[in-house]
Image: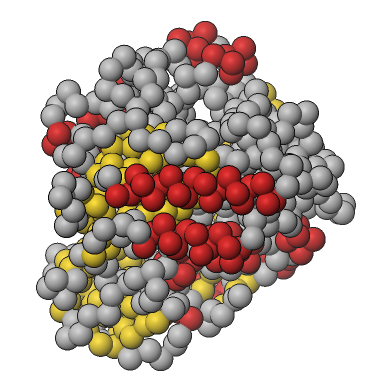
Amino acid sequence: MKKFAFTFLALSLTISVFAQNWAPAGSNIRSPWAEEINTASVLPEYPRPQMVRADWMNLNGLWNYAITDASAQMTGADGTILVPFAVESSLSGVGKSISKTDALWYERTFSIPRKWSGRNVLLHFGAVDWQAEVFVNGTLVGEHKGGYDPFSFDITPYLKKSGKQNLKVKVQDATDNGFQPRGKQCNLTRGIWYTPVSGIWQTVWLEPVAESHIDNYYIVSDIDKGEMAFEVEACTQEGDVVKVAVLEGGVGYSAEKPGQTVIAEAVAEGGKALVRLAQVKTWSLESPYLYGVRISIERGGKVIDSIDGYTSMRKISVVKDNSLNHYRRMALNNEALFHFGPLDQGWWPDGLYTAPTDEALEWDIIKTKELGFNMIRKHIKVEPARWYYYCDKHGMMVWQDMPCVGDHDGKQMPSRDADVVAANKNKWSRDSVLGGTDSKIPQEWKDNYYRELTEIINDFKNFQCIVVWVPFNEAWGQFDTPVAVKLIRELDPTRLINPASGGNFDFTQGAEGFGDIIDVHHYPCPAMNFFDRKFVNVLGEYGGIGLPVEGHTWIIDRKWGYGANKTSAEDVMVQYETFLDMLKVFVQTGCAAAVYTQTTDVEGEVNGLITYDRKVVKVDVPRIAKGNKALIESMPK
């Protein structure tokens, strides 16, 4: 899988840990890729495919860890933990949980290569759940709150001139006993609520940069005009010139294809540049063409900093079909397209939030494509950047949910403090504008939600596969919906907004303040219980046909789906195809998309098309792909 032409410095050269063997914790089922874990080379792929530099150092691997009281310091180690797997996971080698009164500590050492001398050193974290304090050589270098967005610190001032450098990370995570975005994590695990994920759960890495360097960029493509608009964020000095270039592409990005031909370039004045293409190759589901991108800072003709990435030419919009009622449909590149895909939780039996290997991460997407789907609803979770790259590469659209800050299910309340219980007692009015209520979230936690929502959108909006943002689901922690819609529209006016998947629709500020999509849920069979012709109408969840497969279920007493579990794969297929026939009727009467629950089993749920350990595909792949494609093609153009 690794094709990058740059220097990778093995963590085994720099790590200092207890001399003990690592082994997965617990006896739950594991995916096939769990057997491939090498503690000296854990998720070794470059973690940021949109912004690749030549030199970097992966810090994944065995670290020392300790669990202390939140007010205490780390004075010793309880053992070793395999980063970047959450402390609760099997692949961490620990398999322990923490509470809101605990602190989870990590510690390791590293050495700075001599050839990095004279450059600044950035310390990157893909994601840490939830609050992280980072110390280098005993000094606090920064703090971050948010379990899903990447962050980094310039640690240059805190480094010793030579020798081993000490890195400590202190993590606190209340999971659902607080108001942080946490998705389906729950201390009281049951039903649709899963094992908590605490601590580092994505790659940790170092990168040397010049004092003048590129921090970020954003590209908006216009297929109608044949243009790409660049916005570049960079630290520059007087005399620096920022240049952008678009390269010939294909499936892959420029770091994988050195020597690509430059087809258009421009100088970024004030951080902005407009590039015109003589010929446009669009990104589509059948032909997901990716252009290479190179952004550089030059001074006196010399390149000071350069990054490689990629982008594509594609357009997301709403059109009316040619039926008598002129129903609103979603369009890709100005062509109406029915969106059909699975609800994808993104959980693993061995790594929880973290796929065991990069191959495993890609496998889910490839299999979804083989099943004939053209979209994935990434449910209440944000994935590592490489997951979105694979969706871009394989031509898979994504509806991206924002992880929720709460729920409305009283069954979860015994594990929570009184103030958290009070905030979660809102009412979900299914598929309706009537009767639903907002969560009673304190303002500081609203601010936190908006901050993390902003970071997630800014960090992931360069991935062209994302076509819809979903801020709220089934009233879980829902509040001030028009405010969230307005914020998303300001951050990213190029995509559609599905403001309230499953109900609690808020029209108090009129249609303009609502978003683009009406989204209803119905289990197990599909049904459209609410319809408004002013919007795109979709069935955001249905299905959930259960089939437990002996030897491939999570260790839990109850194995459930929506409705009675089936006893054979054929029974699942017959029910699934009956639902497809029902959907074809709804498509003709305005339904523009549907989401089937779900890609894989998850913990106690056995309603996946694939088992939780990814070892058994429960359905006939060619047969289900044929049915899915027939449904997609049944929509009036």
Q: Where is residue 628 in the image (x, y as percent from the top left)?
A: 47, 58
25 to 384, vertically: above or below: above
x, y percentage for residue 225? 12, 73
Residue sitting nearer the eye, 164 or 81 = 81
Q: Residue at x 34, y 71 (%)?
A: 284
| Residue at (66% x, 32% y) in the render | 564
Quadrant of image for the C terminus: bottom left
Residue lying at 68% horizontally and 57% vertically, measured from the top left: 617
Count of numbered tags: 0
Residue 207, placed above or below residue 62: below
Q: Is residue 210 above or below residue 165?
A: below
In this view, the residue in front, 457 or 576, is 576
Location of residue 189 by image quarter: top right
Q: What residue occupies the far right of the structure in this picture?
A: 20
Q: In the rendered view, would you say 547 is above or below 386? A: above
Q: Position of residue 476 (x, y in %)?
A: 43, 26
